[in-house]
Image: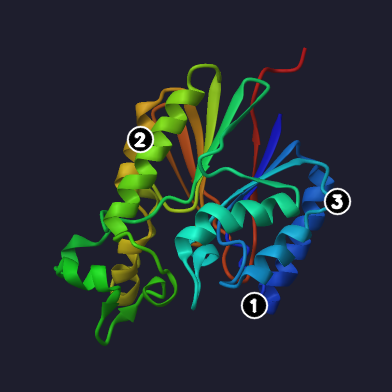
Amino acid sequence: MRIAITADLHWGSREQGDASTRTLVHDLREEDPDVLILAGDIGSGRQETIHQCLDLFSDLPARRFFVAGNHDIWTTDGDSERIFRETLPEIGKEHGFHYLEGCPVTIEGVGIAGTMGWYDYSLRDESLGIDLVHYERKYLRRVASWNDRRFVRWRFSDRELTDLLVEELRGTLAALSVDAEEIVVVTHHLPFEELVIRYPGHRAWAFANAYLGSVRLGEVLLEFPRVRHHFCGHSHARSVVQKGAMRSVNVGSTYLNKRYELLEVGPDPI
């Protein structure tokens, strides 16, 4: 089985990025994968852009899956939790995509699971000596502001949400491990410190590292030996880390240039 994974298409955000997405769709038609997975940040913060992006893949003859990214739950007058739990599955279904959050699948003995994941500041650069209250506010005067503070609206703190999604992922992987011979997990946020690209001397980037993901996501992935493949996005920088038998890949699409990964899984053809 051939799986294509991409992330951070951010449709509607940049003209060059949209052109690169169209090229990616064309290339995927040539690749003809059995499965396509989008690892979050599909649109540019508006639901209509999610519709538009998913529609680009309408004639791709593959089983299609996605997870949310933080941009996909942005709202100025709504409820991010409702978008996350209700609206996004409905949008996906309308366009022939299966929403993986809490709804894994098994295909030919391969389990496929996904979660948006979130951040708990465990990937922050501790050498900065910044008090946690600034990370909680998502604002550091004269340095940087993280836009989730303006557009994500729900009842959880960041660490509460991370706890919730980590525990849900643990349950999902436990259930998949009963029957699946190997498991592919896709998240939007990063699970390992080694996937973080550091920019020495750039204080704003260093502050933003706190919002890239959580080491707890990685701990859960490593609890389950049948998880052999992990993919994520979010930081827009490709990186790869090997953790025992599991390979973790950040796809590395940027706002301007989109890319995808191909994965062959399942039994070898006879």
Q: Tags 3 and 1 in contact by the CB under 8 Å rule?
A: no
Q: Which label belongs to residue 220?
A: 2
Of residues 34 and 240, the one nearer the viewer is: 34
State which mark lies toward you, 1 or 2. Answer: 2
Q: Amino acid at mark 1?
A: Arg
Q: What residue is drawn where x is 46% and y is 32%?
A: 172
| Pointer 3 residue | 59
| Secondary structure of residue under mark 3 | loop
- Give the percent coordinates (x, y) of residue 93: 70, 49
Indicate the colouring scheme. Answer: rainbow
| Secondary structure of residue under mark 1 | loop
Does residue 151 lie above or below 29 as drawn?
A: below
Q: Is residue 222 left or right of residue 74?
A: left
Q: Amino acid at mark 3?
A: Asp
Separation of residues labelled 3 and 1 (CA atoms):
24 Å
Q: Which label belongs to residue 233?
A: none
Does residue 90 lie above or below 103 as drawn?
A: below
| Pointer 1 residue | 14
Q: What residue is drawn where x is 67% and y is 70%?
A: 49
Separation of residues labelled 1 and 2 (CA atoms):
35 Å
- Give the percent coordinates (x, y) of residue 168: 40, 39
Q: What is the quadrant of the N terminus in the image? A: top right
Q: Residue furthest top?
A: 270
Q: Quadrant of residue 200?
A: bottom left
Of residues 191 and 137, the one nearer the viewer is: 137
| Secondary structure of residue under mark 2 | helix
Q: Quadrant of residue 129?
A: bottom left
Q: What residue is drawn where x is 50% and y is 71%?
A: 78
Sooner in the amino-acid sequence: mark 3 or mark 1: 1
Q: Is residue 57 left or right of residue 159?
A: right
Q: Amino acid at mark 2?
A: Val
